[in-house]
Image (spheres, rainbow, N blue to C red):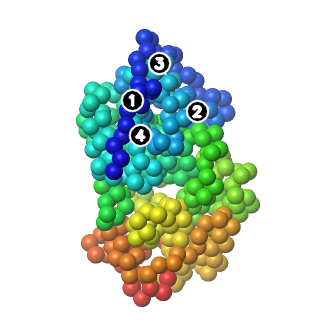
Amino acid sequence: MSTPTLDAAATATAATAATAARIPAGSTRIPIGGERSYEAVVGHGLTGETGRVLGSAPLRVAVVHSRTLLAPARRIARELTDEGRIVVSLEVPEGEAAKDMTVVVNLWRALADAGFTRSDAIVAVGGGATTDLAGFAAAGWLRGVRLVLVPTTLLGMVDAAIGGKTAVNLPQGKNLVGAFHPPAGVLCDVDLLGTLPPADYVSGLAEVIKAGFIADPEILRLVEEDPAGAVHTRELIERAIRVKAEVVTEDFREDGRREHLNYGHTLGHAIERVASYRVRHGHAVAAGMVFAAELARLDGRLSAADAERHRTLLAAAGLPVTHTGAWAPLRDAMGIDKKTRGNRLRFVVLDAVARPALLTAPDEALLSAA
């Protein structure tokens, strides 16, 4: 696994700290509660706000990013340097390859080499894998340091960066090792989506649509009106964040309602694991939602029309509604899902749109039929 590298061009000390910048006009602040409250800010031109969210205390800041995001990471590093901070740029692998304990240990070693203390901070610039990784590193370093997340993908903005969950993967399953560590703030700069590959944008739409099915039917109407999301992107982002913000504020540690956010994820995570993470997260979750809808229909909970709506809406958005692969390895992989209790599988299902529920220990014949 790659070792994080120090970018000398982004490592410097300035004489004085700059005045904290104001949030650009037209931005939307979404409060998120739980064990430690913070805000997700949605708008344009937000990367310059990183220092304001960090506050005046951190002298040293590690900017964690993948190679493809070197440009925005360097821009943030320069701004933090101009504020008088010592900035260390740490490059990590792309995508799910970053979520590995070897990468985490390399990050911790780099922080130790740079003299990071408990009053210093980490900034994560990237998609969900990068923010998950950096969050876990921040949670573990000296038992927790300040963290700011700058998600650069739709998936990161509406899901991974919101809620304080951090994790890395094991060969046995996804997100099996992690910690709850809320950030100091999340900056969702819509401008960063401009260079996102279309397939990655579509993958993020799966989590947006999930929020619609479990809580906000207006999201479904907007996607049906504009499946590509070109017109309603910002509104979809804000609505999806509000759904997650409300849930995690009520149930930060996933003791109850927060489990509903895993709609489609039990099979989705199994697909990712069996495919060695070569399937995009959103694509796997889309197939997982169709499976969960069919499971609920066969169990007499969900109407046939609502189950079919999953297929038509997801397909219109360019997401897969089927998965080709043997059932047995997927069934085995689901047994390690975080919602499993003992040997009892638990699925998030719908009794109707915006009425999520849990289905515990369904009959194997029902699972196979779905």
Task: Estimate the spatial distance between the alpha carbons at disc 3 and disc 2, rounded to whole Å.
Answer: 16 Å
In the image, which disc is placed on residue 91? Answer: 4
Q: Nearer the viewer, residue 184 or 166?
A: 166
87 on left or right of 189: left
The tag earlier along the polypeptide, 1 or 2, is 2
Give amino acid for label 1: Val
In the image, which disc is placed on residue 46? Answer: 2
Residue placed at 59% from the left, 38% from the top? Answer: 189
Q: Residues within 10 Å of mark 2 (few under 14, many from 20)?
A: many
Residue placed at 69% from the left, 55% from the top? Answer: 229
Give amino acid for label 3: Glu
Badge 3 marks a residue whose secondary structure is loop
Q: Tell me the quarter of the picture where residue 316 sits.
A: bottom right
Q: Tell me the quarter of the picture where residue 170 sits.
A: bottom left
Q: Residues within 10 Å of mark 3 (few under 14, many from 20)?
A: many
Q: Are marks 1 and 3 in contact (CB under 8 Å)?
A: no
Q: Nearer the viewer, mark 1 or mark 3?
A: 1
Task: Estimate the spatial distance between the alpha carbons at disc 4 and disc 1, rounded to whole Å.
Answer: 10 Å
Residue at the disc numbered 1:
88
The tag earlier along the polypeptide, 4 or 3, is 3
The tag earlier along the polypeptide, 4 or 2, is 2
Q: Which residue is outermost to the bottom? A: 365
Give amino acid for label 2: Leu
The tag earlier along the polypeptide, 1 or 3, is 3
Residue at the disc numbered 3:
83
